[in-house]
Structure formats: C-alpha cells, structure tokens
Image (tube, rainbow, N blue to C red):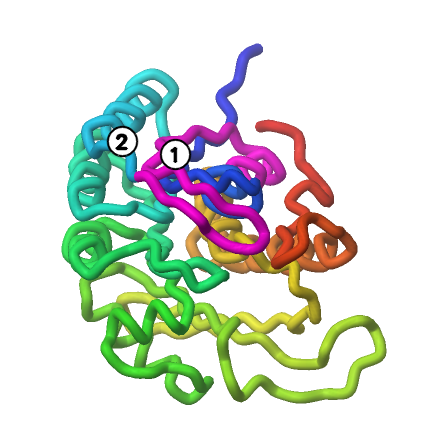
Amino acid sequence: MLSTPPRTLTIAGSDSGGGAGIQADLKTFSALGCFGMSAITAITAQNTLGVTGVHAIPADMVAAQIDAVATDIGVDAAKTGMLGTAAIVEAVAEAVDRHGIRQLVVDPVMISTSGATLSDDATSQAMVRLLFPRALVVTPNLPEASYLLGRRIARRSDMETAAADLLALGCQAVLLKGGHLEDDRKADRDDGLDGRGLDDLLMLADGTVRVFTHPRIDTPNLHGTGCTLAAAIAAQLARGDALADAISTALDYVAQAIAAGARLRIGAGNGPLNHAFAPRALG
C-alpha cells in the first residue's frame, strides 16, 4: 500500500558550504523523516569563514519553483529563510496564498553568523508587512528582534516584552531565540557543557508564554543553527505536531545536532551541526 510522507518546503538561499540555508534545511527534513523540497531564493558563495558573494534569483523564478512543487507534490508545511529582495518576499507571499500554505515558519534571516548582511531595509519591511501575518510562527534571534523593534534586546528580562511587541507586528506566535543572551545562568559543569542555561521564549497570540531551556554547548560549530531550528519546526508541523510540541521537539533535535557536531572538524571557521546524528525513516 502506498503512503504519502510528510512534505516540507524550504524557501531560502543556497549555502555553498553546506552548513546553512537550503542545504541545512533539506538535511533536517530528511533527518526528521520528511520529504524535503526547495525554492532557492539566492545563491551564496560561502564557507565556514564567511560569505563572499550573494546573487538573488529573479522573483518570478522563485514563484515558479514553489508553484512546481506545490501543484504536483503538495506542501504540508513550509519555512522561509534568506529571501534577498522585497520582490521575492512579495512573490513568496502570493504563492503562500495561492497554494493555501497554512503552516508557515518564517525565520527572518537578516545577518549571517559571520556578520554579512543578507537583507536590506526594504526586504525586511516587506517581510514584516507580507509574511508575518501569514506565519504560524516567526523565529527571530535577539539581533534580528533588535533590528525589527529598533532597540537593543540582549537580556532575559527584555525577552517577554520584545516578544509581545513582535506579536503586535501581525504574526500568530513568536519564538524568540536566546542564543545571544548576555545574562545566561552560570553553573559549574564537568560534562563538556559550559554551564550556561539557554532560554528560548515562545509567545502565542493570546499572550501565553512558554520558556524552553537547554544547556549551552561550548563549540564554534554553530553555523546554520537558526535555519536548522526553523526547518525542524516545519518538519514536526508537517508530521502533525501542535505548534508548542513541534517547537519542543525541534529544539531538542537542534541541541543534539549541536552536541554531535561539536566533535566534527569541517573547515577552518564556524563549522556546521551534525544533522544526521540519528536519522528517521521517511514517512
């Protein structure tokens, strides 16, 4: 008897180094037992040391990629990453409506791990105006939240107010990632972890708050962490999880992928996670 596996679509940029973007998303989809598809928004020349070139794909070609897979294969959940231009954002929003994609995870990618700018003001504003209202959840890190809200957010005490202000921009839920917190809890550890608690805060449209806490792992191999998390949330949504459960499972997956990746040596800079540490069967 034939069966249809969970179908997940990533709409994002290509990372030639394989650690982030489309490549990380597809690895994550496969690791979590989903059939992954892609609509490439930009081609980047990058490795573990940084981004040396970016070339945006024409917006009509981005839309054509989404149309091709959505009309034939179908989309149970999708995530966006680097979008590149305001025209691409508009094309993606129209395609989301055209194909009735309801489970959309928006990762507002603006700055790479190495500090390269991946989104200009017009693109960021279009993302807020067109994609936030269509998103089931938006997943900014603290620098991205700071940019969107026009104020510095770096402490745990700032996160709940910031999440509420981000919700006011029109999305259904916000997962504010605490990887850049300056006031992590301290503890002495002897198990390879550096002892700091890492908090990610989920706020729903009704004001409900849930905090997920994981130990921070002392490793430079964090390239693609945000992409991987958004992709993992989309994968779990496609598998039928409710949002909070999808986020909890996705965060656990990312934490384990970081731990497994900490033992790898790939490139001379910030290496990737190990997405395939415990792959599931497709379906």
- On the rendered structure, is 143 left or right of 67? right
Compared to residue 271, the image places residue 29 above or below, namely: above
Q: Which residue is labeled 2 in the image?
A: 62
Residue extending farthest to the right is 190
Q: Position of residue 143 (x, y in %)?
A: 38, 72
- Residue at 28%, 42% in the rendered image: 102
Nearer to us in this view, 102 or 108: 108
- Residue at 38%, 61% in the rendered image: 111
Q: Which residue is labeled 1 in the image?
A: 76
- On the rendered structure, is 235 left or right of 171? right
- On the rendered structure, is 149 left or right of 144? left
Q: Which residues are magenta?
A: 26-55
Q: Give me the C-alpha separation between circle 2 and circle 1.
A: 19 Å
Q: Amino acid at mark 2?
A: Val
- Residue 238 visible here: yes
Residue 117 quadrant: bottom left
Q: Position of residue 115 (x, y in %)?
A: 43, 64
Residue 149 quadrant: bottom left
Q: Are marks 2 and 1 in contact (CB under 8 Å)?
A: no
* Dominant secondary-structure state across the stretch colored magenta: strand
